[in-house]
Amino acid sequence: MDLKKTIRTVMDFPKKGIGFKDITTLLVNGPALHQAIRDMAEPFRKSNAAKIVSIESRGFIFGMPMAYELGLGFVPVRKPKKLPAATVAETYALEYGTDSIEIHKDAIVPGEKVLLVDDLLATGGTMEAAVRLVKKLGGEPVAAAFLIELDFLKGREKLPGIPVHSLIHYDSEA
């Protein structure tokens, strides 16, 4: 199945000029969702990762079933003040301003290898911050996996030294 055909592009959302990649059309298609999870997990079946670190909220849609599929632990990265125990935070740049993400301080053991997962790689700022969180805790990122990559935004350039695996690529907003 061509997974790209199951994703709808909504033009001018959330603002004019943006071609929003709406994954809900893939999510409601059981066979497509199953294939997406299986295909995202496949390159990592023999990896030495112990956990998947995934970013709120759409990253959870893919990270958790990948963790299950691969028999790995799952670590959520969330927006500030959403995790109940002690956390560490990272701030990253947005188009106009900044945002932050947090992870539990005890989520990763020093030296532990992790696979980072999110639904979309655009400019790379959020994933770059997640990588910094993993490294702050002494973890070692082995790779980053995405359902979609917007190649024209060059987000993988913010992840030097980390192999990036994306199932679906777009070279323009349309």
Image: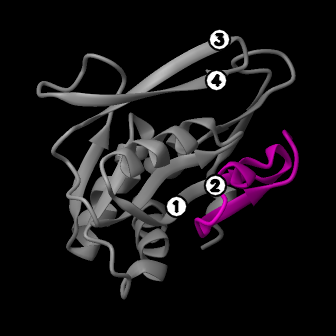
Q: Is residue 166 magenta?
A: yes
Q: Residue furthest bottom?
A: 46
Mark 3 and mark 4 in contact (Cβ < 8 Å)?
A: yes
Q: Disc 4 marks which amino acid?
A: Ala
Q: CA distance from mark 4 to mark 1?
A: 20 Å
Work out whether residue 150 or residue 113 is closer to the camera in this orientation and state it. Answer: 113
Q: Classify mark 3: helix, strand or loop.
A: strand
- The numbered disc on residue 93 is 4
Residue linked to disc 1: 144
x, y percent for residue 132: 47, 44
Q: Are marks 2 and 1 in contact (CB under 8 Å)?
A: yes
Q: Which residue is mark 2?
A: 159
Residue pointed to by mark 3 = 97
Measure how far apart labels 1 and 3 are at the Cα level. 25 Å
Answer with mark 3 or mark 2, whichever residue precedes in sequence.
3
Whole-percent x and y of residue 10? 73, 31
Q: Is residue 78 above or below residue 105?
A: above
Residue plotted at (62% across, 66% down): 161
Q: Which mark is residue 99?
A: none
Q: CA distance from mark 2 to mark 4?
A: 15 Å
Which is more foreground, mark 4 or mark 1?
4
Q: Residue at x 43, y 45 (%)?
A: 59
Q: Earlier in the sequence, mark 2 or mark 4?
A: 4
CA distance for labels 3 and 2? 21 Å
- Image x and y of residue 57, in percent: 39, 34
Within 10 Å of disc 1 (Cα), the crowding (few <14, some 14-19, many 20+) is many
Point 72% across, 47% down: residue: 155
Callouts 2 and 4 close, C-beta under 8 Å:
no
Q: Amino acid at mark 3?
A: Gly
Within 10 Å of disc 2 (Cα), the crowding (few <14, some 14-19, many 20+) is: some
